Amino acid sequence: MLSTHKIKHMKYLSTLFFGGFAVMAISLTSCGEDDGGGTTPPPTTDNSILGVAADQGYTDFVAAIDACGLTPTLSGDGPFTVFVPANAAVSAAIGLFGATDPTQVGADTLSSVLLTHVLGGEVYAADLATGYVKSARPVSTDFTPSSFVDIFVNTAGPSIAQAGEVILPDAMGGFSRIPFAAANIVVTDIQCDNGVIHIVDNVVVPGGIGQMLTANPEFATLVAALEFGSTSSLNPYGDLVAALSDPNTAFTLFAPTNAAFLAAVDVDMDGDVDGDDLNTLGADAVFGVLANHFVAGGMVLSSELTDGQTITMASGSGQDFNASALTVGGAELNAGGLDVCASNGAIHTLDGVIGF
């Protein structure tokens, strides 16, 4: 069971009853005059997110925030919701970067990782819903229009369920990919003056499109289709799920839900889309369908689409965007599932399958 902590400040007066008489014990030690003839001010308590985190013992996170210059932000009015990793998780993450101290990790890298733990507004455990939610981490500092990376929260865990990775330059002039697992939410609702804290058991990093799909049960059929379509002789991308998480390539994916696939390709009419249906269609046909759903080499948000625009998909086909009907290639877009931003692109949820 999750433990829920609420930070409350109370003053206690201890009253001792003995022999029918009440003796009130009140400490006056700090209330008298100081050596200068004035009064000693009462101690102050820092009830900000960082103050409470430090007071609760999550000092490694506080040190990491300070090392990358985010202390003024999280000391501000907010409100914020922060998923604070346990000390062991922060220490392990610093070690993955080849460092022993957060100051040895580049400030930009550290900041981008830590901002993934921050949400705008106060989101308590009861307010969390399974789905994607925007973090405070920008997709890219030079991306226009600006947007922010999503994380996937699964309340069944509860967890921040996407795996992810951090990309760092290596000594050979290339890049190394440092993987991170999903994070369980282990403590919730620690109240602060400028927001709320939830404790997680791992450091959270952005996931690529493939990782964001894998985390979401609503895209289980799409993931299965991607895995099956990867075996097609027409497929130049290799493992499609892995390719869609490639940090060196931006993608825009129009992603059919399980229900969309069920309505379109339940070949044997048994109430689900499984290996039998995919085998009946064949790997080449499945890949052909999938290639009509993604753009390789560019991230496109819904605000950039114009009515009547033709979107050239990876298959080479052109699929028209209809703004009034909110469709792409005749398949209906889910208005609540647009502009889900992964570390390498955008996902737009479809309630239909293009070409069906």
Image: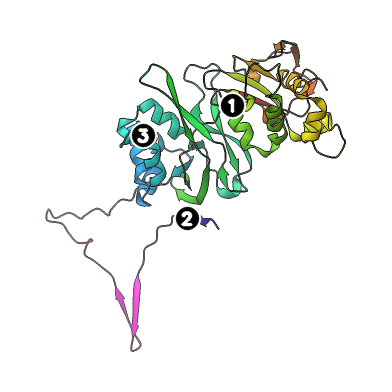
Residue 233 x, y percent position in the rendering: 70, 18
**What residue is disc 2 on?**
6
Going by the numbered disc 2, the residue's amino acid type is Lys
**Res 101 seen here:** yes
Q: Is residue 30 left or right of residue 37?
A: right
Residue 123 x, y percent position in the rendering: 55, 43
Residue 15 located within the stretch drawn in magenta: yes
**Res 327 seen here:** no
**Label 2: how many Cα within 10 Å (few below 14, some 14–19, many 20+):** few
Give the image quarter of residue 175: top left
Label 3: element kind: helix
Q: Quadrant of the C terminus?
A: top right
Q: Which residue is outermost to the right?
A: 269
- Relative to 196, say whether 298 is above or below: above
Disc marking residue 242 = 1
Q: Is residue 15 left or right of residue 117?
A: left
**Label 3: how many Cα within 10 Å (few below 14, some 14–19, many 20+):** few
Going by the numbered disc 1, the residue's amino acid type is Ala
